[in-house]
Each structure stands twice: as C-alpha cells, then as structure tokens.
C-alpha cells in the first residue's frame, strides 16, 4: 500500500468535460499542486453519500483556505455516475475522478474486494494530501462503512 512520502503511481482517470468524457492523468491532476484526494468505495453508497462527501462539500472553502489548490474525489465508478453524484451532492468546485477499472486503486494498493457484497473491486475509503504528486498525509479507514479518519474534519486537523 502507498505510504506517506511515496509518489503517486501513473494512472489515467476519466472526468466529464464539455464534450463528454476526457482522460486526465495523475500528472494532470497533481503535478505542481496541493490536492486533497478523497477515495470512496462508490458513488451514492450510503456511507459515501450521507457521511463522507458531505463533509468535504460543507468544508470546501475552509480546506482551500489552507493553501490547497483542489479537492478531488475518486471512486471505482464510471464517469457518468460520478458526474451525476457530483450534481446530486451540490459538490460544485470539487473534482470527480472516475477510476472505472480500479487502475488507480490497485496501483496504490488502496483497492478492496467487495465481491461478497456484489460490488466487485472497489477503492478503500481514505483521504490524503498530495503535494506535487507526493503523499504527505494518508488517512485510511479500517472499515469501508466508517468515515471518521478520512472525514473532512479529521483532515482539517492535520493539513
């Protein structure tokens, strides 16, 4: 599993652009920037939708005021689902990075097997601070149903 001090691996996300889905690489998102990256098991899932994402939406300005360039959320969902989730959550100003094949989750070692619940391979729940592609803070939940260590309030205490 990726650790504090490690460089993020190269991966390609999908984002919804004005002309439809577009590819964005790890470098496109993180190079030369301070980014809070939030990993969730899935868009619209109960803990993600009710407990995890709302804290980042509510605390967006406070997080950005700490010298953070962007808040990004990634999940093993397709770009269309993440776009719908962003709109349904009122998450304007937060970047949603679709990791539809779990390539990023697997490359970081932050993947989990949710096949027992009919979910397939998903991302663990986490929050990290990434500076110019290097992980500076990494808070990973032990249980995918918890959003405590990786919540916005916990992250604000350490950034």
Image (spheres, rainbow, N blue to C red):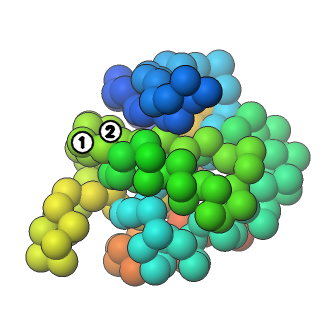
Label for residue 101?
Answer: 1
Report the residue at 55% width, 24% height from top: 19
As displayed, is residue 78 above or below residue 153?
above
* Secondary structure found at label 1: loop
* The label number, if any, that marks residue 14 in the structure image: none
Residue 56, quarter of the rendered image: bottom right
How many C-alpha atoms fall within 10 Å of the one at disc 1: few (<14), some, or many (≥20)?
some
Q: Residue furthest front?
A: 19
**Left of 25 or right of it: where is 76?**
left
- Compared to residue 156, the image places residue 148 above or below, namely below
Count of numbered tags = 2
Q: To which quarter of the image does residue 143 belong? A: bottom left
Between the residue at mark 1 and the residue at mark 2, the CA separation in whole angstroms equals 8 Å
Whether residue 143 appears in this view of the structure is: yes
Residue depicted at x 48% and y 41%: 97
Which structural element holds mark 2?
A: helix
The picture places residue 70, in percent across and down from the top left corner, at 70, 39
Q: Is residue 60 left or right of residue 50?
A: right
Tell me residue 42's x, y (percent): 39, 63
Residue 80 vs residue 92: left or right? left
- From the top left corner, tell me how far across and down residue 55 is, in percent: 69, 69
Relative to the observer, which residue lies in front, 56 or 96? 96
Q: Residue at x 66, y 70 (%)?
A: 54
Characterize the local packing of mark 2: few (<14), some (14-19) or many (20 or more) Cα atoms within 10 angstroms.
Answer: many
Using residue 48 as the reference point, say whether residue 101 is left or right of it: left
Identify the residue shown where x is 85% and y is 53%: 61
The image quarter containing residue 129 is top right
| Number of the label disc, if any, that sits on residue 104 | 2
Considering only vertical position in the picture, is 56 above or below 23? below
Residue contact between numbered discs 1 and 2, judged by CB atoms under 8 Å: no
Whether residue 154 is visible, yes or no, is no
């Amino acid at each position: 599993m990726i650790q504090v001090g490690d460089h993020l691996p190269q991966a390609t996300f999908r984002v919804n652009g004005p002309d439809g889905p577009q590819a964005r690489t790890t470098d496109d998102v993180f190079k030369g920037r301070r980014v809070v990256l939030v990993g969730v098991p899935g868009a619209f899932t109960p803990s993600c939708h009710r407990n995890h994402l709302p804290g980042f939406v509510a605390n967006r300005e406070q997080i950005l005021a700490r010298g953070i360039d962007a808040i990004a959320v990634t999940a093993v969902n397709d770009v269309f689902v993440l776009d719908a989730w962003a709109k349904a959550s009122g998450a304007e100003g937060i970047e949603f990075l679709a990791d539809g094949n779990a390539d990023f989750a697997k490359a970081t070692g932050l993947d989990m097997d949710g096949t027992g619940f009919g979910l397939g391979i998903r991302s663990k729940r986490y929050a990290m601070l990434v500076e110019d592609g290097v992980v500076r803070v990494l808070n990973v939940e032990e249980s995918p149903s918890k959003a405590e260590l990786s919540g916005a309030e916990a992250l604000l205490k350490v950034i």
